[in-house]
Amino acid sequence: MNLNIALLPGDGVGPEVLAQAVKCLQAVEETFNHNFIYREALVGAIAIDKKGSPLPDKTLQLCKDADAVLFGAIGDPKYDIDPNAKVRPEQGLLKLRKELGLFTNIRPVKVFPTLIENSPLKKEIISGTDFTIYRELTGGIYFGEKKLNEKGTVASDLCEYSEKEISRIAHLAFKAAKNRRNKLTLVDKANVLESSRLWRKVVTKIGESYPEVNLEYLFVDNAAMQIILNPSQFDVILTENMFGDIISDEGSVIGGSIGLLASASVGDDNAMFEPIHGSYSQAKGKDIANPIASILSAAMLLEHFGLFEEAMAVREAVDKSLEKGIMTPDLDAKSQYGTNQVGDFIADNIVDSDDDFNINDE
Ligand code: IPM
Ligand code: MN
């Protein structure tokens, strides 16, 4: 298969982890005879520094022209200190999501059996955790009208959703549940928010077309509790933009490190793949960031294009690195392995299992 992949390394540890994902994609190309073309562009704080904009036009065009975007990370602490900063790196990511129409963000949360002791939560609680968050990504409070009065003393952010915005992601979430364990949990705050009540109404109606899927509702505060009390009860969680942002970070605690969670953002015409972790600027250039979230994002990219065997080969190589203890310090404080070494190990272990079988057969 030929694929045009836009690479957006971004800020902080973004470039380091993205480089490992690219290594793995190159290993996939070689092992499975594909041809991927990579084109890199600026986004985030580095783009502000070099081009004066967190999402230069050239970057946006490159992403629109590509089959898929592989994203590193965004954000720089120097912009967090000044609450009045006119441009912020995060605006680049938000604009990119909006412009590419990436309305669904898919975030799988799973426990790696080899890492079960790594979680701050008890083994009995987290074992068997395997759920996927469907987070709405281009609407809600992130994109509603923002206001600040002249004195700078009163501010507001509007959380607005239309039926259309809800139904398009709801269909994807129901379909995902159908292919999994037939359970969908809508997370909202319908006891307080009008927008949440619209979510309930629309999702309930759509649910009638998916009778095999068991639809449940949870208020977001209760969901926050349930996710760490009893995570294995969940299959697919559907929620709006900001609730999804918050509960997916919470979900990352289950597996022991936020450095493990990958995500896919999809729309009608484009797709982007990125770790859920941020730029982790303190670790920049130190070769300690966990590349697995980025590598698993590349695996999700492969799956998006139907390259399931290839994605499985990447996942198996990741499992192998964890089994052998070849992991970064977030997973093992005594680790001797850096970002690059873990990336190399995983890339080197990407094999076509059919070939393996043949060799063993002979
Ligand atoms: C995420 C991030 C972003 C978000 C930030 C960087 C704007 O936290 O992808 O979860 O809030 O969506
Ligand atoms: Mn987030």
Image: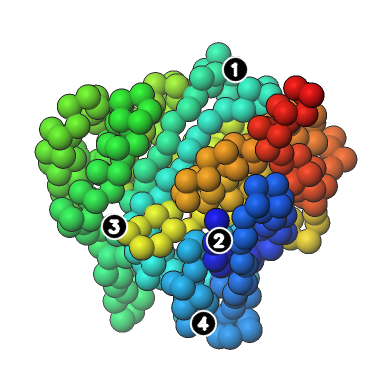
Q: Which residue is labeled 1 in the image?
A: 123
Q: Which residue is labeled 2 in the image?
A: 2
Frontmost residue, 153 versus 83 = 83
Mark positioned earlier in the residue sequence (1 or 2): 2
Mark 2 CB near ligand 1 (8 Å cut): no
Mark positioned earlier in the residue sequence (3 or 2): 2
**Residue sitting at x 31%, y 81%:** 150
Q: Which amino acid does label 4 sit on?
A: Lys
Mark 1 CB near ligand 2 (8 Å cut): no
Q: Which amino acid does label 1 sit on?
A: Lys
Q: Which residue is labeled 4 in the image?
A: 58
Question: Which type of secondary structure does the marked residue at label 1 adopt?
Answer: helix
Distance of label 4 from label 1 (alpha carbons)? 48 Å
Residue 35 in sight from this viewpoint: yes
**Residue sitting at x 36%, y 52%:** 104
Question: Which type of secondary structure does the marked residue at label 4 adopt?
Answer: helix
Mark whose residue sits in front, 4 or 1: 4
Mark positioned earlier in the residue sequence (3 or 4): 4
Which label was assigned to residue 242? none
Distance of label 3 from label 4 (alpha carbons)? 27 Å
Which label was assigned to residue 140? 3
